[in-house]
Amino acid sequence: MKYQGVCIAVKDVALSKKFYQDLFDLEVFQDYGINVSFGGLSLQQEFDWLLNIPKESILKESHNMELYFEEDEFDNFIAKLEQRNDIRYLGEGVKEAGWGQRSIRFYDLDGHIIEVGENMKMVVNRFLDSGMSMEETSKRMDVSVSDLEKLLHG
């Protein structure tokens, strides 16, 4: 068995396709009109029809899952988000976790939660570039030096 990805319900597949292409530079793998696949992420309009369930049972903002992305150029991505007028943020904006990774959460056009986190390799490099040693970075991130080296060189 092989995991193929996630399919999310959308109201307007054309608008949602443009949203994900513009924001995440995703390329369409397959386009069947009411179903568009980017590879690991698929968008399905008329989800109720697909599952043969009542339309009113399709929830918006169910807050029980999120789509997670990592970004190498995190600051550039934040600037890209700030240029849009269709982004509704979840929480106060950019947060920094105890281990130093920055992330942001927001909703897509249909109320699905999206989290974009700074690529962990970039977090390590940010600390090293600030003058911290590998040992100090290890302590700051609560990760072994050998795991950090695997992350940097693996």
Image: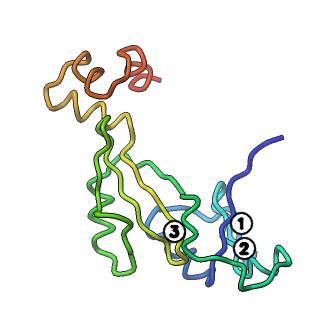
Question: As shown in the figure, which amino acid type bears the numbered disc 1?
Answer: Gln
**Residue at mark 2:** 35
Quadrant in which the N terminus appears: top right
Residue at image point 55% right, 82% down: 15
Place of residue 89 in the rendered image (x, y in percent of width and height, measured from the top left): 36, 69
Q: Does the CB distance between marks 3 and 1 fall below 8 Å? A: no
C-alpha separation, residue under disc 3 versus residue under disc 1: 14 Å
- On screen, 132 above or below 36? above
The label nearer to you, 3 versus 1, is 3
Q: Residue 91: x, y in percent?
A: 34, 64
Amino acid marked by disc 3: Tyr
Foreground disc of the pair 1, 2: 2
Mark 3 secondary-structure assignment: helix
Corner quadrant of residue 90? bottom left
Residue displayed at 34% across by 24% down: 142
Q: Which mark is residue 30?
A: 1
